[in-house]
Image (cartoon, helix red, strand yellow):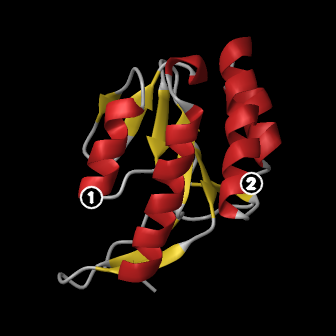
């Protein structure tokens, strides 16, 4: 079985942002997201793989037999935009996106340019809903 590439690492989150994120606004938004997601999840930030900052973790196992661990919620400050890992496949999450702001939806993440483009209260609801959903559907 192939090893999951997105595993928790020992890299310091603040060091990662300071060395990886060049744009000062994106750096400030990254530190703000860390503060918010830490508060909402009750978990300390950890690096997952080379570029994802995650909060908490859960274990998943697919019918195919593939299994692994992943963060409950997280984000990555990609070069052109943020990837937010806060979405669960529910009608409630889909409805919340109506009030979210300016974003693009990917297969498993939400992409935004900057925090000022979105409604932070809605982001909080999406994060909390995702954590409940994952807790109910995974160990």
Q: Position of residue 61 (x, y in %)?
A: 32, 82
Label 1's element?
Answer: loop
Query: Measuring 26% from the left and 59% from the top, which residue is drawn there?
Result: 90
Viewed as shown, does residue 37 lie left or right of 19? Answer: left
Query: Measuring 46% from the left and 60% from the top, which residue is drawn there?
Result: 129
Q: Where is residue 106 in the image (x, y as percent from the top left)?
A: 28, 38
In the rendered view, tell whether residue 55 sits above or below residue 111: below
Q: Where is residue 109 in the image (x, y as percent from the top left)?
A: 37, 43
Q: Which of marks 1 and 2 is nearer the N terminus?
A: 2
Which image quadrant is residue 14 in?
Answer: top right
Label 2's element?
Answer: helix
The answer to the question of whether label 1 and label 2 lie on touching residues, with beta carbons closer than 8 A, is no
Q: Where is residue 92 in the image (x, y as percent from the top left)?
A: 31, 55
In the rendered view, tell whether residue 44 sits above or below residue 135: above
Classify the position of the N terminus by image quarter: bottom left
Q: Residue 89 carries which label?
A: 1
Q: Which mark is residue 47?
A: none
In the rendered view, tell whether residue 29 sits above or below residue 37: above
Disc 1 from disc 2: Cα separation: 23 Å
Residue 34 appears in view: yes
Q: Which of 76 and 135 is in front in this view?
A: 135
Numbered disc total: 2
Give the residue pinned by disc 2.
Answer: 39
């Amino acid at each position: 079985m192939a090893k999951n590439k997105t595993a928790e690492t020992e890299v310091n989150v603040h060091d990662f942002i300071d060395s990886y994120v060049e744009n000062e606004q994106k750096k400030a938004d990254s530190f703000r997201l860390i503060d918010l997601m830490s508060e909402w999840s009750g978990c300390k930030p950890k690096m997952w793989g080379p570029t994802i900052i995650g909060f908490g973790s859960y274990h998943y196992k697919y019918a195919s037999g593939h299994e692994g661990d992943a963060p409950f919620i997280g984000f990555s400050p990609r070069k052109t935009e943020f990837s937010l890992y806060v979405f669960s496949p529910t009608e409630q999450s889909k409805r919340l996106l109506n009030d979210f702001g300016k974003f693009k939806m990917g297969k498993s993440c939400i992409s935004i340019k900057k925090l000022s483009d979105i409604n932070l209260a809605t982001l909080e609801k999406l994060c909390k809903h995702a954590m409940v959903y994952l807790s109910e559907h995974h160990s």
